[in-house]
Image (tube, rainbow, N blue to C red):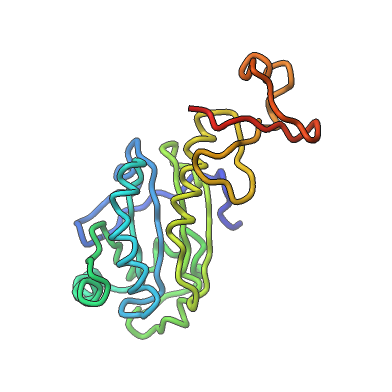
């Protein structure tokens, strides 16, 4: 059965560019972003790794750790990092998993369980399904899954927006509407009854429909 939102993120041990890690221990009490790549030295992924490196301070501010993955050895990641710095201006400043045994790719349903063999003999097209983003909470549960095609670079500003929503809605009993940005109005969660809402929001709320209760973003 495929991984779903709310499932515990599979734990694993792996070699990374910053040494061996045990995933759940590495997350600790933080949030985590795990994002995967089908092959080193691929064009779109090169731009993504550089873009994420530049945005790392924004993730740090939100208490989100970054972890990359590619189905290639860690030694290749180090060489690729030089190209990323040269072409994008910033080298990866977060660990990258060398998933040469496909263990993590299989655990996270990015490759079929039957895959085996030398990763150097596989092309990016062979691994094209290894293009996921997983956002994982401090409770080690998956909060979001995005899957991108190889030809479309990831929008990390959108991923930051989603993290802002996830972190706020984990703290307050609200939801965010379409295209919400931090500071804009939010929606009282459907799990909150009107009687409960009156105690939480004594100033009241706007309700164009009884099930659509709009309030300012909680502080």
Note whether 45 is above or below 61 in the view shown: below
Front in this rendered view, residue 110 or 183 = 183
Residue 27: quadrant of the picture: top left
Q: Give the image location of residue 178, x and y in percent.
A: 63, 49
**Quadrant into which the N terminus falls:** bottom right
Q: Give the image location of residue 104, x and y in percent.
A: 40, 61
Left or right of 108 in this view: 62: left
Left or right of 62 in this view: 193: right
Residue occupying the point 25% across, 60% down: 16
Residue occupying the point 47% across, 38% down: 167
Residue 46: quadrant of the picture: bottom left
Q: Give the image location of residue 17, x and y in percent.
A: 21, 62
Q: Give the image location of residue 150, x and y in percent.
A: 48, 76
Left or right of 16 in this view: 148: right
Front in this rendered view, residue 158 or 93 = 158
Front in this rendered view, residue 98 or 42 = 42
Residue occupying the point 49% across, 78% down: 151
- Residue at the extreme right: 209
Residue occupying the point 54% across, 28% down: 172
Note whether 111 is above or below 65 in the view shown: below
Residue 67: quadrant of the picture: bottom left
Q: How many marks?
A: 0
Note whether 25 is above or below 49 in the view shown: above
């Amino acid at each position: 059965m495929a991984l779903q939102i709310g499932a515990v993120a599979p734990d694993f041990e792996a070699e990374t560019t910053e040494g061996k890690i045990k995933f759940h221990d590495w997350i600790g009490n933080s949030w985590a972003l795990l994002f995967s790549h089908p092959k080193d030295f691929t064009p779109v992924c090169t731009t993504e790794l550089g873009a994420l490196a530049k945005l790392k301070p924004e993730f740090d501010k939100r208490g989100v750790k970054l972890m990359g993955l590619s189905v290639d050895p860690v030694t290749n990641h180090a060489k690729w990092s030089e190209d990323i710095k040269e072409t994008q201006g910033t080298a990866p400043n977060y660990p990258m998993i060398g998933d040469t045994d496909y263990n993590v790719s299989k655990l996270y349903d990015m490759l079929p369980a039957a895959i085996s063999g030398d990763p150097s003999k596989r092309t990016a097209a062979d691994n094209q399904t290894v293009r996921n983003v997983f956002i994982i909470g401090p409770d080690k549960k998956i909060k979001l899954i995005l899957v991108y095609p190889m030809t479309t670079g990831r929008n990390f500003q959108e991923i930051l927006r989603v993290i802002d929503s996830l972190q706020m809605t984990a703290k307050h009993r609200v939801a965010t509407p379409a295209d919400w940005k931090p500071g804009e109005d939010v929606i009282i969660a459907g799990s909150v009854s009107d009687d409960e809402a009156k105690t939480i929001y004594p100033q009241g709320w706007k309700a164009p429909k009884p099930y659509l209760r709009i309030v300012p973003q909680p502080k």
